[in-house]
Amino acid sequence: MTNSNQNTSKGVSVVSEAVCQQIMGRTEAFSAVENVFSAMAKNSAYNFPVIREAIGHADALYGFKSGFDRDGMVLGLKSGGYWPGNIQKDLTNHQSTVILFDPDTGKLRSLVGGNYLTAIRTAASSAVSIAHLARHDSKVLGLIGAGHQSTFQLRAALEQRDFEKVIAWNKEPENLTRLAVICDELSLPFESVSREVLCAQADVIITITSAFEALIDTNWIKPGTHIACMGTDTIGKQEVDANIFASARVFTDELAQSITLGEAQHAIKAGLINQADIIPIGEVINGTQIGRTSDDEITLFDGTGVGLQDLAVASVAAKLAEEQGLASYFNL
Ligand code: NAD
């Protein structure tokens, strides 16, 4: 197969953050992420080992996420990290750029701004989990966390079911306003609640925080809930009580990350579950594994965030920008 979905004749294409925001919507991100999860489960796509280093300057964490998707013919990496001082410079703390190569020749193909794409690919991941695992009659959406990612999570989740109400909790309650504004715009009731009330009412819960301790107790979760744990992407982070894993049906984007740096790391360490208990969501998408097995079952998606998601959305963004004349070009 050749990499026919990108323009080769004009040189290396450059797709800016602004163009990504203009052309990449939630629908495009959803299908790109769903397709790559499917390819991962078929062993047609795989992530390479992640590099992440404290560089000893500006308190920055810097690294690469990379991989190859043979189904989509996408090869490349996301380079970037976290610069805590950026906020004072009026810049986003998380900085990323996606670099795509031609899988047939290894030639550089595209440079794509990765900040906005990271947000929509992460939101697409939990949205894919809701689409495949949440009860179809889910009415109440609960969010734990109201940081930068949360608004993207909210909008993508709301498109998956006919939600009638949104409830949320955040460590700094004043930041919940950003979620309330979206609900107002969409004419959906919004309420700030305690974590316990959130669990008692929500049919779908998304956790998207940087917490290092459980924010949700197992006994609070009602039967039939779908939980998408999206914040835990590092060793030591945690959002839910590890005991939930023993009774829930558990899914993930990538097994290797889930058991080491994802939400499942704590349940694995405590011996509450083992690796074989965790189902790659791609297998549900491909129909080789059942998703939810009953209305009373608790389903949990451990969304750790993989490089192939970044490459998938960046590849679509590059293709759309090239087709619409919105990319610029240079030659090396
Ligand atoms: P942010 O810094 O804008 O917001 C952080 C959020 O975490 C806030 O709501 C804050 O109140 C909350 N928080 C921090 N410490 C907490 C604690 N001890 N207890 C409870 N809440 C706490 O970050 P963001 O960009 O919104 O990202 C949120 C998290 O998602 C980060 O941990 C980030 O690493 C992770 N993330 C995951 C993926 C993925 O693919 N899974 C992708 C991007 C970001």
Image (tube, rainbow, N blue to C red):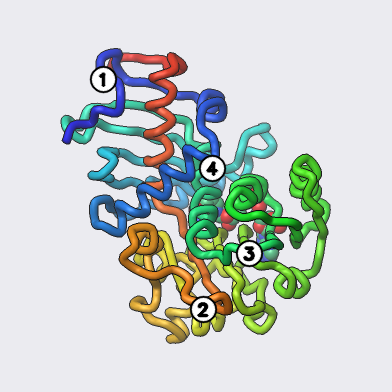
Q: Amino acid at mark 4?
A: Ile
Q: CA distance from mark 3 to mark 4?
A: 25 Å
How far from the left and from the top, in percent, is residue 86?
62, 38
Between residues 142 and 163, which one lies in front from this camera angle? 163
x 73%, y 75%: residue: 200
Q: Secondary structure at mark 4?
A: helix
The residue under label 1 is 8
Q: Amino acid at mark 1?
A: Thr
Q: Secondary structure at mark 2?
A: loop
How far from the left and from the top, in percent, is residue 258?
42, 66
Q: For the C terminus, which image quadrant?
A: top left
Circle 3 residues within 10 Å: few <14, some 14–19, many ≥20 = few
Which quadrant of the structure image shows residue 318?
top left
Q: Amino acid at mark 2?
A: Ala
State the mark number for residue 248.
2
Q: Amino acid at mark 3?
A: Asp
Quadrant field for ligand 1: bottom right
Q: For the N terminus, which image quadrant?
A: top left
Residue 228 visible, this angle: yes
State the mark number for residue 120.
4
How far from the left and from the top, in percent, is residue 37?
37, 53
Circle 4 residues within 10 Å: few <14, some 14–19, many ≥20 = many
